[in-house]
Amino acid sequence: MATRAIVFAHLISGCFAVKIDTTDTLSTSITTDTLTDTLTDTLPTTITTPTTIEPTDTGPTTIEPTDTLPTTITTPTTIDPTDTDPTITDPTFTTIFTDPTVTSVTVTVTTEPPTDCGNGLVEDGEECDDGNSSDTDECPTTCKTAVCGDGFVRAGVEVCDDKLNDNSYEGCAPGCSALGPRCGDNVLQADEGELCDDGNQTAGDGCNACLTENLPGECGQAVALPQPGRNVASQVEEVECDLDLPVEGQWSRFVGSAGKRMPTAAPPQFSCGTHAPGWLNGSEPAPADGVVPREVCFHWEDETCHFKVPIAVQNCGPFIMYRLPTPPTCALRYCGVD
């Protein structure tokens, strides 16, 4: 007589069901956790576990899902993106999960264009899509219609676009139709850090990059940092990083709306148009001190000196210049203050 039996074997992490068909008599006694078999003949040496349980087979009609779960579940309650690199995740984004079955979660926060931006089809979240990678036409790579203030200069329409367009020094005039005041416009703007302005970029004529050539040391080579967003007091909504600075450092000075010097106290996180703002951890030297070593700290994760880099500083008299290297990661930026 053919006999069909369902065998339940308990493992440490749960149970599985096996179905055994044999043409000989099988006497079976089954309890919840103990399996006792009395075989009157030789059973097959290999048992193949079925992948499904037929509802017509004899056996329990309910399989408890808790039988297959781990006995211990570690539940993440809070994902704090500030534990990671400042640029990888939006540090203002925090999510709380209370589902005890969740053991790992990946959170991605981005302000990038829609993933299909550039395919030539206007889809959800897009205002336009011309299918190209140009940022100088009517539809830049953000798939938003080009306007003055988007930071892209439209060819043949705009002269400049710095997002602010408030006629600030080295910036752009309202309407994106003209440049703002700047070094080289033949107008001396001492308040913006100019020592001279002869209207040209000719070296050796007594005025180079709006600096006189009688400055001490390398002061005449300082590169202007005019970006308004660098200022601690700026309300510019941007996230910039100073990765374009050379690794070995560049003599730089703050001009215009960016400020006149580096702050000597830690600015708040997310100020200066970045995530982790940089500040001078030390005093400013006097002109007679020459070039002195100093340290720049970057405020992050509520630590005012979470990142730090060594720099050099010199008081040139009319201004202070800083030899600024590439920061250790992003988004880190050197701040200015008035």
Image: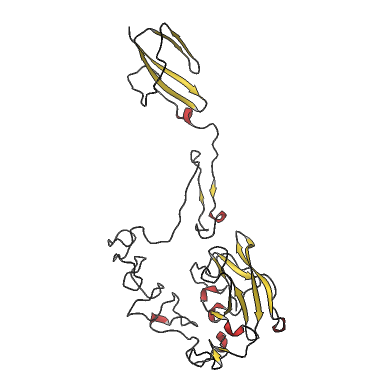
Q: Quadrant of residue 82?
A: bottom right
Horizontal side of residue 63 vs 80, given as left or right: left
- Quick check: 96 above or below 337? above
Residue 125: where, in percent of width, then height?
34, 60
- Quick check: 237 above or below 204? above
Q: Quadrant of the C terminus?
A: bottom right
| Residue nearer the viewer, 234 or 207 | 207
The residue drawn where x is 38% and y is 83% is: 177
Residue 300: where, in percent of width, then height?
60, 61
Residue 14: where, in percent of width, then height?
48, 26
The residue drawn where x is 45% and y is 76% is: 164
Residue 325: where, in percent of width, then height?
58, 70
The residue drawn where x is 60% and y is 66% is: 268
Q: Quadrant of the N terminus?
A: top left
Q: Quadrant of residue 179?
A: bottom left
The image's colouring method is secondary structure
| Residue nearer the viewer, 238 or 39 | 39
Horizontal side of residue 296 vs 48, given as left or right: right
How many marks on residues? 0
